[in-house]
Structure formats: C-alpha cells, structure tokens
Image: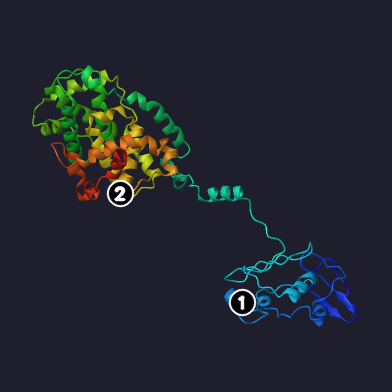
Amino acid sequence: MEISIDNNKPTNLQVKGEKIVSRKFGVEIGNNRRTLGAINKKGGAYIYPCVVNKRALSQANGNNENSVVNQVHRPVTRKLAAEIANKKQCLSEDVLKPKQSSESLKIFEDEDQPVPMTLETTEPEKDLMEVEMEDIFEEPIVDIDVSDTKNPLAVVEYIEDLYANYKKMESYSMVPQSYMLTQQSDINEKMRGILIDWLIEVHHKFDLQHETLFLTVNLIDRFLAKQNVVRKKLQLVGLVAMLLACKYEEVSVPVVADLIFISDKAYSRSEILEMEKLMLNTLEFNISVPTPYVFLKRYLKAAESDSKLEHISFFLMELCLVEYESVKFAPSFLAAASVYTAQCSLYGFKQWSKTCEWHTSYSEAQLLECSRKIVGYHERAASGRLTGVFRKYNTSKFDYVAKCGPAKFIVDEFQQ
C-alpha cells in the first residue's frame, strides 16, 4: 500500500515499505532526502525521543561524550548529521545554532523553559510598538455629563454653550487691581479684607447659599471701583451688597431689620435703602455676572470630587476672596487654581487630570503661580486678625477641612 503525498497538509516523516514521504514544517523536502531512520542505520546520528529533559550546559559538558547532542531536540538534516558524527563538538552557547541550508528549520532554545517551534518569527516594528503603548496609557478625557443626560435641570444639551458664554462674559465682572489706589482715598485693601472676613461670618450665621457670598464680594469690588466711599460707610456698602445678593440668589431673604441688628445699629433703615439705590444705579442694575462659584462647581465635577475635596476647594476659594491681590485673577482661573491646590493638599502630590485641563482650559503650568499664592493664604489662615474663614471651616459641618495641611511642596519646588 502506497502513501500518497498531500501537498496542502503538513505531515511528519512516514516510512511505508520502500516509499518515503517527507514533509517538514512550512517547507517541502524533496524525494532525494533520506529519512531519519536511513541516516541512523549508517551510524550518522543518534535516535532521539520526542521529548527530552533539558540539562544545564555545565552538565552537558561533563564526561558524557555525546552529551552535546542531548541539549536540543530537532529534525536532523544530512549535513547536520555528518557534522555531529565527524566532529562531536561542544558548543559554548546556550542555543545550538547549526549551519543551515535554505531548507533547514530555525530552532530557538530558551535557557529556562522550552519554547515551541514556529515556522516564522516576526518582531513588531519598534515605532509601531511605541505608538501602541502610548495609545494604551494615554489618559482619556471623561464625559462628566453622561450621568446627567436624563436630568432636565442639568441642561446637558446646553451646558458647554453656557460655560463658553460664562468664559466670554467673566471679563465684564472683573475690576482692575489698582482701583483701591486710583478710586479710593479714605479706605485701603486691609479695610476691604476686614469687611469681607466679617461678611463671611455673617453669611455663615445666616446659613446662606454659596452663590450669595461670591456675588456679594463681586458687587462690593465693582461698586468700590466706580464710587468713592469713606471708611465709616464701608460696612454699609457690605451690608447692602449682601442684601442685593440675597434678593438675587436666596429664597428666604434677610430683612432690613436683621442687617441693622448685625451692624449693632450703626446704620438706619433709610441709610440702607439709600445705599441700595446708589449701588444699583452705579452698577446699572447689572447683577447677573459669572462669579467663581459657577466655575468652581463645574471644575469640581470634572475632578470627580467627593465632599471633602469640595469643602477644601471652597475653603481655599473663600481665603482668596479676603485677599485683595486675588482680584486680578479671572473667576474661572481662580476657581481652577483652588481645585488644583485643594487636590494637592488632600492627596499630597500634584494632580491635574486631562479631564480637568479640558474643561478648565488651564494647564497645570498656568495654575502654579496662583496656586503658590493660595498655599500662602492657607498657611496663615489660622493666624492674624482675619480668621473668619478658618473658624467657619473648622467645624463638623465642613468636616474640619481647615485642619488639612497646606501643600507646601508646591512652594518648596519653586524656591529650589
């Protein structure tokens, strides 16, 4: 019975009678090649089992003269069999690499564990591998609004347009940093700081919304940038600004009598109403402006914040409200710097994700200068005369976040 040769399916060497059918992996062997059995009959090589136990090279070079051929199991060609039979040479390398003809197989031997034979070994291009690794480890930009698609109050369809408009309009809510020198003659920046620190305590006592506080400070600065005020009327300006902000933001508004009471009756009802009319006319009834609050809420969402990070961010943001030098920063920039500094304080290392950078449009490098100033405010929050913000956030309502240590490493890196 003859065995036919199927040129499409690879098979091992088989012997049947006088017919020899040969096939090697991936490459056909011509009929003029001898079988392994034929070579062994003439003493050309040893017969090896299909599976051999590998031994270390030091063992292979021992007393056994034929130990070298036991290191690798592979098909034996005529040329290779002749070399082994004639020379019996020991190789010093871990991998046995015989001289091969164009038809011979490539055998790879690992030092520790056997590696299966393959027809071809192709290595991926280095550039392609690097590109693929960059794609794998590139930080994605998270869609922070995907969870609010079914919430009509979140207005997901318009949220990006809203914040683009906020960014466009925020410059109209800003004041020049030099207004205290150019516009005011009887008050200074320290008096402004004392007023806002006191208003933060009043805001906390009345349990008002965050929006009310930020709008109050904005109304004070914009009014002082246009109207000269004597120092004995400065507290009145703060009270009226809070009254207008409450009317704009709050559901339950403090009445005029409450403002008179907290000012220790320093001002009469008529004085409060008169200042209210003056402030509205000076500001041309332009009350609807983007404050740092609207940006802070958005950026906290981008940072995937929890309650503690949110409290620290508001704590640092309110410290900025007290400082006169912070008026030079845009509301969106100040909000982004507060969130970034809060993350550094809470986690102990710099953290500014691609998602935060995308939604704020500010990089980490842009925020560092402002962040260092905020760290300075944080360091002296519990000392000095202006401690209203520290005492407010050093309560159980705000998880005692005022006790969180400042991110001093941001300042130390800059000084080095």
* Residue under numbered circle 2: 346
Residue 276 vertical placement versus 18 (above, below): above
The quarter holding residue 93 reads bottom right
Residue 403 vertical placement versus 84 (above, below): above
- Drawn side of residue 326 relative to residue 32, left or right: left
The quarter holding residue 410 reads top left
Residue at the outermost front position: 87
The three-letter code of the residue at mark 1 reads Asn
The three-letter code of the residue at mark 2 reads Leu
The residue nearer to you, when weighing 97 against 120, is 97
Residue at x 41%, y 37% (from the top left corner): 363
The residue nearer to you, when weighing 404 against 15, is 15
Question: Which image quarter is the N terminus in?
Answer: bottom right
Question: Which image quarter is the C terminus in?
Answer: top left
Q: How crowded is the residue under tag 1: few (<14 C-alpha within 10 Å), some, or many (20+)?
A: some
Residue at x 76%, y 67% (from the top left corner): 25
Whether residue 157 is visible, yes or no, is yes
Q: Position of residue 413 (x, y in %)?
A: 31, 42
Q: Position of residue 36 (x, y in %)?
A: 79, 77
Q: Which mark is residue 21?
A: none
The residue nearer to you, when weighing 332 against 369, is 369
Question: Quick one: SS at disc 2?
Answer: helix
Mark 1 / mark 2, whichever is N-terminal: 1
How many tags in the picture? 2
The quarter holding residue 37 reads bottom right
The residue nearer to you, when weighing 40 against 344, is 40
* Residue under numbered circle 1: 61
Question: Quick one: SS at disc 1?
Answer: loop
Whether residue 407 is visible, yes or no, is no
In this rendering, which labeled residue sits more in front, label 1 or label 2?
A: 1
Q: Position of residue 214 (x, y in %)?
A: 27, 33
